[in-house]
Amino acid sequence: MNLPLFGGSRRKRESTVLRDYAKTLEEAKALMKEGDYDRAQILFRRINRWVSEDFERVSKLAEEDKKKLSRILTEAGEDMLVLKDYEYAIKTLEKAKGLDRNNVRAWIDIGRNLLERNVQLPYAVSSLKEAVKLAPNNVEASIMLGDAFRMQGQLKEAIESYTHALEIDPENEDAINRILKIEPDNVEVLKKYAELLKKKGNDTELLKVYNKLYSLTKDEKYLEEGLDIDPGNKELLITKVRHLMDSNELVEANRIIEQLREDYPDDPTVQMLYEELSGGEKEEVKPIAVDELFEDLGIDETLGEISAEEKESSEVKEEIKEINKVDEFLKSFENGNFDEAKEILKNLSHEEFIDLANREINFELAKFMVDNLEIEQGNTILDEMISQQVYEYAEKILNEILKKNFKDAKALFYKGKLMAAKGNDMGARNFLTMSVKFNSEMKKYIEEDKILKKYENEDWYKKLIS
């Protein structure tokens, strides 16, 4: 029976109820395809209104017919969602699940309606929980429930829902990506993602995942498999160089970094890695002798042969006491007395800091030193070290920092300044640029620094501090 587009409701025999609803739904869909969204919306709303007007007839329908009508209403509600007619969409979907409580699609679509508008999230959660309860193997319901939990800040529950979806469908990319947004270092999920990307032939993304997996597991197979796919991949080769440096395989590391410098001469990360490797090689030089160090610091080299009478002089005692501040700092740091270590560090003299730099420096100690010195104080100390040309000691500290955290803006600034002092203009430019990239406040220190003034007429320098 053809229904008018406009006009009041009409009485329908029970035998024609489902046919009339279905026919009107088809007409509304046809109007949507033609782009006549306004008229389509009118018909969708009319379907919603008829359910109330035909309440007595609808309530007398057989259960199977009620389920069929529930599906018609669900489809109408979904199309209303497409038209963003949210209010009528949810009214229609509520009527759909009222006719058939087991209509999983209606429960899911109610949740989708609320999520798209970011409203009534608790109701979205309860609706989607019901959908999962009715259809435990419905991947879409589990993913949307995870979305609802995530929007409420319930990340643990969100992970559980996404994981459930992944258990049902181990290759579901939506579930994988959602888990990785919350837990980017989830090794097991990254492995699943790698297998999926391999099947899809998405080498670009696969190489990124392999790089990530190596950084988390230190398993060389991820590097090798990635380089088998793309032997010239810059990111993987950079990671390979770091692996070789950690393994003390410096000849092979040098070979790769030289090729990278040739292929990417302006890449700051490649330049930084080259400087790290160069610094690491310089550290192999025989450490400065104690007597030479004392001479550089202006301390009498015969101090080790002080007579008993001389040791009793208050002046010599004070000198020895000051030198031992370095040992006090290291002892406090090693014992975990970080507040005490911080205070000692701040009061060390330039000479004592150089002595400290000459000790064995690991990443944790280097990071503690850089983090707990004001940049002005660190700058002063670095100037002193540069004036004495003890570059190796300064590089040893900075290389340890940047090896583990290449985004440390303060360390990058110091490294750039050190490169400038050594006459490595390209290195200075790259490190300073990266420093500002990660912390724009570094601009003022670059502009005020005396050593860096030599670049003030360079275009890159003007652009950097502008």
Image: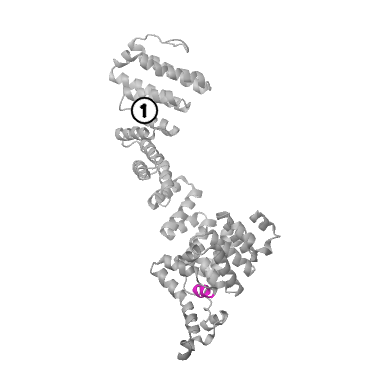
Counting from the top left corner in percent of width and height, residue 277 is at 54, 67
Query: Any magenta on residue 382?
Result: no
Look at the picture and state if 148 lies above or below 19: below
Residue at 55% across / 55% down in the picture? Answer: 438
Is residue 355 found inside the magenta-colored segment of the image? yes
**Residue name at image x 38 percent, y 25 percent:** 93
Work out whether residue 455 can be spotted: yes
Toward the viewer: 362 or 381? 381
The foreground one among 201 and 75 is 75
Q: Percent position (x, y) of residue 231?
A: 53, 57
Residue position marked by numbered label 1 in the rendering: 106
Residue 43 picture quarter: top left
- Relative to residue 311, is residue 279 depicted above or below? above
Which element is circle 1 on?
helix
Q: What stretch is highlighted in magenta?
A: 351-356
What amino acid is found at the position of numbered circle 1 in the picture? Answer: Ala
Q: Main secondary structure of the magenta part?
A: helix
Apparent side of residue 255 relative to residue 222 in the rendered image (left or right): right
- On screen, residue 145 above or below 442: above
Q: Where is residue 387 in the image (x, y as percent from the top left)?
A: 61, 73
Residue 173: where, in percent of width, then height?
42, 43
